[in-house]
């Protein structure tokens, strides 16, 4: 894979560079961006291109509905870099704006997913996008697991490179697939059936794997414990997973009753009308020594229902990790959002990944469709 950071300035100056960025971010009800983490990460490559005289044309998507617009993204991004937002993708307005760009200029075009051909990986659409530039840079690790036109189609038609963020994500997550020992992994989220292959891999490659979030509910259910009205996956852990010597699960939980009152109790005491919403203090005490002893820590997924305000134990774990000298990789949009709310300060040993699903797929497979497209 070729990196744009290795391209000399003389080869970038004056070139129209199509930059696929991962700027899909959560919005507040008033339409403003609520978390600029991905914007801050994306600016590394944007600044590099601009400072070297490239004419940077940013392609990105937002949300799942085609009517959604990159306008709030443009407002948020303009607080970090100088750019022009064009609410058009392939029309006259977009092409005219690109035609008058000067060296160092940055333009952000409209939401890629306004055109259904993007998600359909339409070849004609990919060629139309490629016609806007001279070079292509993929810096959108967060969507590199999607075989979309802007990810895997454009590289067929332009000289293509990985951006600075993509380079760092791939290098660091490659190290996470073969961690230094002792190693400790924390995996949350839901849908055991989709995470089962990764769980089995982590049990082999990591010294200990702690399963939390809704995945822990599946563990309780598989062990014959009550789970009340908690979220349960279609598939439950097998005896092979549950009995694995590297496998760890919560030993206490926070539950919420129908009257919204929350209590900490042992898993075997969960009542029929209660919902498991987080871990408890005994579980934090259980995993704290593993965090302290680890030389490599991997973490994806908060411990509780963060959207309902159950974040305190995730914050506590973040604080424990901040005191570790281990090499740390943390990913998942929910995890990053909760950690940033905690205002925990991490050192240079901690890498925050922009990937959620992309991070998990890369850990399992060691590659992604977007990476393969750059290697062609």
Image (cartoon, rainbow, N blue to C red):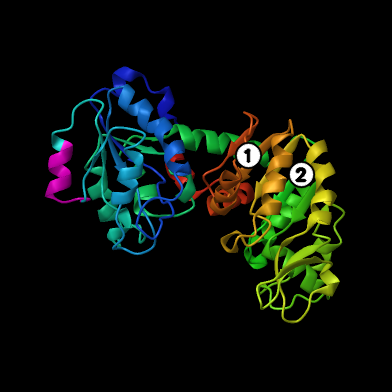
Real-space CA distance between mark 1 and mark 2, rounded to the nearest whole angstrom:
20 Å
In the rendered image, which residue does mark 2 sit on? 184
The image shows a total of numbered marks equal to 2
Task: Determine the image quadrant of residue 154.
Answer: top left
Image x and y of residue 29, in percent = 39, 60
Task: Determine the image quadrant of residue 13.
Answer: top left
Image x and y of residue 335, in percent = 60, 50
Q: Looking at the magenta stretch, what is its main secondary structure?
A: helix
Give the left or right position of residue 198, taking residue 128 as reference. right
Answer whether residue 186 is magenta in the image.
Answer: no
In the rendered view, would you say 254 is above or below 322?
below
Residue, x 84% and y 51% (percent of image)? 286
Give the left or right position of residue 77, taking residue 91 as reference. right
Q: Mark 2 and mark 1 in contact (Cβ < 8 Å)?
A: no
Answer whether residue 93 is magenta in the image.
Answer: yes
Q: Residue 344 carries which label?
A: 1
Residue, x 22% and y 43% (percent of image)? 131
Residue, x 62% and y 35% (percent of image)? 345
Image x and y of residue 291, in percent = 78, 41
Image x and y of residue 48, in percent = 38, 26
Give 305 or 193, whichever is nearer the viewer. Answer: 305
Determine whether the residue tagged by mark 1 lies in a helix, strand or loop: loop
- Considering only order in the chain, which callout, 2 or 1, is on the residue closer to the N terminus? 2
Residue 1 visible in the displayed image: no
Give 20 or 327, whichever is nearer the viewer. Answer: 327
Give the left or right position of residue 79, taking residue 208 as reference. left
Query: What segment carries the magenta color?
Result: 88-98
């Amino acid at each position: 894979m070729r990196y744009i950071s290795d391209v000399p300035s003389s080869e970038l100056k004056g070139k129209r560079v199509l930059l696929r960025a991962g700027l899909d971010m959560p919005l507040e009800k008033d339409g403003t961006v609520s978390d600029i983490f991905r914007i801050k990460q994306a600016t590394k490559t944007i600044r590099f291109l601009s400072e070297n005289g490239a004419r940077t044309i940013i392609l990105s998507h937002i949300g799942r509905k085609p009517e959604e617009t990159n306008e709030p993204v443009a407002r948020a991004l303009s607080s970090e870099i100088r750019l022009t937002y064009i609410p058009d993708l392939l029309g006259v307005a977009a092409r005219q704006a690109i035609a008058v760009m000067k060296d160092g200029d940055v333009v952000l075009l409209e939401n890629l997913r306004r055109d259904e051909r993007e998600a359909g990986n339409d070849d004609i659409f990919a060629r139309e996008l490629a016609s806007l530039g001279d070079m292509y840079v993929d810096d959108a690790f967060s969507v590199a697991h999607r075989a979309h036109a802007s990810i895997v189609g454009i590289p067929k038609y332009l000289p293509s490179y990985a951006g600075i963020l993509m380079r760092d994500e791939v290098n660091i997550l490659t190290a996470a697939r073969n961690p230094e020992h002792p190693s400790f992994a924390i995996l949350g989220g839901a849908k055991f059936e989709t995470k089962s292959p990764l769980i089995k891999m982590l049990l082999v490659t990591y010294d200990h794997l702690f399963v939390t979030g809704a995945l822990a509910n599946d563990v309780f259910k598989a062990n014959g414990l009550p789970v009340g009205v908690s979220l349960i996956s279609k598939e439950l852990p097998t005896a092979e997973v549950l009995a694995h010597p590297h496998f760890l699960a919560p030993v206490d939980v926070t539950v919420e009753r129908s009257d919204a009152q929350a209590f900490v109790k042992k898993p075997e005491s969960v009542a029929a009308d209660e919902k498991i919403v987080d871990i408890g203090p005994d579980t934090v005490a259980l995993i704290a020594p593993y965090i302290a002893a680890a030389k490599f820590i991997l973490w994806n997924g908060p411990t509780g229902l963060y959207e309902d305000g159950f974040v305190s134990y995730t914050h506590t774990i973040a604080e424990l990790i901040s005191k570790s000298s281990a090499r740390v990789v943390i990913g998942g949009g929910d995890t990053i959002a909760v950690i940033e709310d905690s205002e925990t300060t991490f050192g240079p040993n901690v890498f925050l990944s922009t990937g959620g699903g992309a991070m998990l797929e890369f850990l399992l497979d060691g590659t992604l469709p977007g990476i393969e497209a750059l290697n062609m």
